[in-house]
Amino acid sequence: MTYLSAASALFLSALIIVAIARQKTGRVFQKHVLLFAISLLVCAIISNVLISIYITEPGQGSQPALEAGIVLSKRVQATFDYMFGITIGAFIVVATTAGITSRKDFFRYMTNEFPNSYVFYVFIMVVTIVTILVSPVQVAQVNPPLISFEPYFLFINGLAVATLILYAPYRFILHMRRTNPGEEVRRDTFLIIFGISGFAVGELLFEILLPNFGIDLRAPGFILEMALVGLIAFGVREKSFLQTLIVPEAEAHLLTKPTYELDRGYTYAVLERDAGQAFEIFKDYVTHGTQGLCITRRAPKAVMTEYGLERTPILWLSRVSTEKNAVRPSPPEKVALAVEHFIEVSEHCVVLLDGLEYLVSHNDFGSVLALLHDLNESVAMREAVLLVPFDPTAFNEREIALVRRELRLLGPLAEEFGPVAKVSR
């Protein structure tokens, strides 16, 4: 039964590894961390089976040797399991921290944010591993195994399991509140939380509590624990899992003095033939510590390359694009939801809305003006800055007058149409 269950668990783990490896995601480091965590569980199963075959099977040695083999099996598997706990904790940190996309980012985060919750989490896991390796364990009987653990051993393992159970909901739910993802991402996130917490409970139940009462359900426990881990793989199957496209994050924190300084809480129409100055102002803000969102008619990759934007979220204003980061121009409420969501979850942000003429062409000027009215109020309430590149040659005098009444004017062509907003340079 043990071998059949172990074989089934190994088969499940192989499917899980293949599923994770085939995930097409932009966050490769996150995927690699999860793969390493699963490989530790595979090592736990394989080592357990090998020790069972060569040491703990009846007829393989004397009674003391069998008892020593059972203790060794428990310690080796528990060590691998808690190493899995450490690694899955790292996966939780990576998945819930937008700026971590590589090993270098992870170590930078650990250094800059030290001490942090993960440091205490790892400390508890390491203490538990040391306790497992050095604490005395009594084997009262071999078949079925009846194992007696020290009270402090049970307490420390219970503390470690409770930490793992609570850490996943703490990080994931906090991240969802901050980014407000859609229903599908929420559902997948709760599946992952259930998988991680369920595995921790199963480890405590099948490996420690039940053997303490002479109940050996480790064989089916293998399958159940791997099935719970499978929920994690199912939860991250989507390319966009926890990669909410609108995650507030500053591009950089340059120590130089910003070139531009605008009054917060206003929407600015940047009057120019192209959007050059608007992008220049936007880049100046996001590279000096301001969280920014760019909505543009240009392909996001081209914008990233030209202006050196790597962390700033960029949405593609497009009617035909099927990319995850595309937002359709009609109805204009789709754009409003994206901007208002970002303003709500960020602090004193800057938003660039490039493509006003495109919005008008797919709707009408009245609905787009209503969009600007709504965004203007949201910007004022959250003390944000909204930049709207505006080509006056594309609109008639009445439309320009309506925009001028609602927005502050900037840009090389602004003086022709009224008072220009003050900007420090």
Image: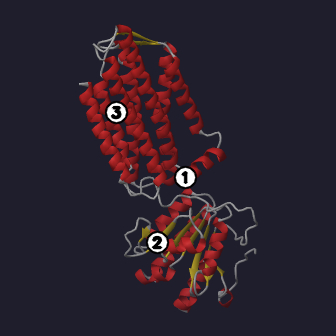
Instruction: Classify mark 2: residues with Cα within 10 Å, few (<14), some (14-19) or many (20+).
Output: many
Q: Residue at horizontal 49%, vertical 51%?
A: 29
Q: Amino acid at mark 1?
A: Ile
- The figure's colour scheme reads secondary structure
Q: Residue at horizontal 63%, vertical 61%?
A: 348
Instruction: Classify mark 3: residues with Cα within 10 Å, few (<14), some (14-19) or many (20+).
Output: many
Q: Position of residue 154 (x, y in %)?
A: 47, 18
Label located before the other in sequence (3 or 1): 1
Instruction: Classify mark 1: residues with Cα within 10 Å, few (<14), some (14-19) or many (20+).
Output: some
Q: What residue sits right under mark 3 in the picture? A: 225
Q: Secondary structure beneath disc 3?
A: helix
Label located before the other in sequence (2 or 3): 3
Q: Secondary structure beneath disc 1?
A: loop
Quarter of the image with the N terminus in it: top left
Q: What residue sits right under mark 1 in the picture? A: 100
- Would you say residue 365 is visible in this rendering? yes
Which-is-in-front pick, marks 1 and 2? Answer: 1
Q: Position of residue 37 (x, y in %)?
A: 44, 40
Q: Secondary structure beneath disc 2?
A: strand
Quarter of the image with the C terminus in it: bottom right
Q: Are marks 3 and 1 in contact (CB under 8 Å)?
A: no
| Along the line of sight, the residue nearer the viewer: 300 or 333 | 300
Q: Residue at horizontal 66%, vertical 86%?
A: 414
Q: What residue sits right under mark 2 in the picture? A: 316
Q: CA distance from mark 1 to mark 2?
A: 23 Å
Q: Are marks 2 and 3 in contact (CB under 8 Å)?
A: no
Q: Quadrant of residue 65?
A: top left
Which-is-in-front pick, marks 2 and 3? Answer: 3
